[in-house]
Image: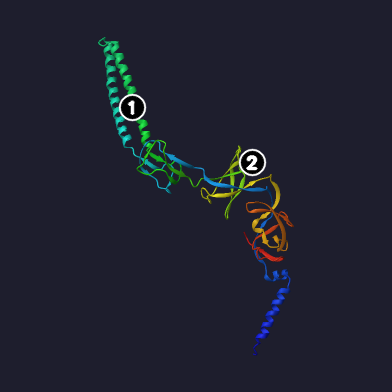
Amino acid sequence: MKEKSPMVVNRRIVLRSLLLLVLPLNCLAQDFGPALVKVADARMLDLSSIVLVPGTVVSRDDARLSAEVAGRLLQVAEVGTVVTAGEPVAIIEDKNLRLINQELQAEIRRAQASMEFLGNEVQRFATLAKTNLASANQLEQARSELAVAQGDLDVAKARLAQNNDQLARTRLLAPFAGVVVERLMRPGERVADGGIVVRLVDQQNLEVVARAPLDYYAFSQVGEQLSLRAGSQELMATIRTVVAVGDENTHQFELRLDLESQPFQVGQTVRVSVPSSNAREVLTVPRDALVLRPEGTTIFVIDAQQQAQQVAVTTGLGSGDRIEVSGNVKAGDQVVIRGNERLQPGQSVQVMDS
């Protein structure tokens, strides 16, 4: 068999390339076969214009724990220690309080012994008084001394209870679960009553604090969800409270938003999308449906023949993963959100099972 010359082979390759260049794009699209895509519906939503304001992630439980008794610190939790509610974060020396405790217990025993003796005296004088062997004054004096002994016993018990309370407070307990983020005193130092020892922060129960111009106060409602952004992260947070009184110097009001998950760290700055107008009904598509090219923004709409038709759109308001569009698209249309990067106009598609 005679081999073809290299010149003939190259000529055929050039002719095939020229043929591809002159073929219409829709013909090429059909030659490529159905494209595998994922779709979503275009639908109407109530959206409002927004302004981005800075917010800060804070903990709802952030406390500086102070000593409630004076004394020398024996232990102080290290920075980074994770504690549960009720676990000690610092221990104060209690030797003197324990000695006072022993003294008060001895006073209680002495008062109880005195009461027992005086009780017997009252009974004895009461028996003798019936036979006129003891005067009424002796009986009344014994009863008075018994009452005084009862009072001494009550005072000693109260002082013991107070001392036990002071002993319990030598262990500085965490009021909530959290992390020790600051240690203001060290073991060996003497702390005064009310002296701050550690700072404890709950890193799970978080919220965002943001401040916005008072002009937009009427458009933020408790329970409404707002978008938060920090770098590439974005999520929705619910308004927990709106502080009605604006700052007279900055003319701003305060928003506090609950974080249902913990993607951010305490102290992180986020951008909060605050409504700046009343909501209006607009046509929206998922942001993933947008195809951004130098000639403009388009989306692909699936027609009745299961073909992708490219439609030029203009974008508007956005909320979360959806954005307002205007163009030759209507509510209920299926738009491509996956696989649209390489689609050609008129190309047949096969919808992926979600």
* Residue 141 image offset from top left, x and y in percent: 30, 15
* Whether residue 300 is visible: no
Residue lying at the far bottom of the rendered structure: 1
Q: Name the residue located 28 percent from the left edge and 29 percent from the top edge.
A: 106
Mark before the other along the chain sequence, 1 or 2:
1
Q: Are marks 1 and 2 in contact (CB under 8 Å)?
A: no
Q: Residues within 10 Å of mark 2 (few under 14, many from 20)?
A: some
Disc 2, SS = helix
Instruction: Tell me which amino acid carries mark 2.
Output: Leu
Q: Name the residue located 26 percent from the left edge and 13 percent from the top edge.
A: 128
Q: Name the one closer to the observer, 216 or 226.
A: 216
Q: Name the one closer to the observer, 80 or 38.
A: 80
> Image quadrant for the N terminus?
bottom right
Q: Name the one closer to the observer, 352 or 160.
A: 160
- Say if 129 sits above or below 346 in the image: above
* Whether residue 37 is visible: yes
Name the side, left or right, on which 159 lies relative to 133.
right
* Residue 224 image offset from top left, x and y in percent: 62, 44
> Which mark is on residue 206?
none
Residue 93 figure quarter: top left
**Residue underneath mark 2:** 214
Residue lying at the far top of the rendered structure: 132
Disc 1, SS = helix
- Say if 59 sits above or below 337 in the image: above
* Residue 153 image offset from top left, x and y in percent: 33, 25
> Image quadrant for the C terminus?
bottom right
Q: Separation of disc 1 and disc 2 at Cα?
A: 61 Å
Instruction: Tell me which amino acid carries mark 1.
Output: Ala
* Residue 262 image offset from top left, x and y in percent: 52, 50
**Residue underneath mark 1:** 156
Instruction: From the image, state whether disc 1 or disc 2 is nearer to you.
Output: 2
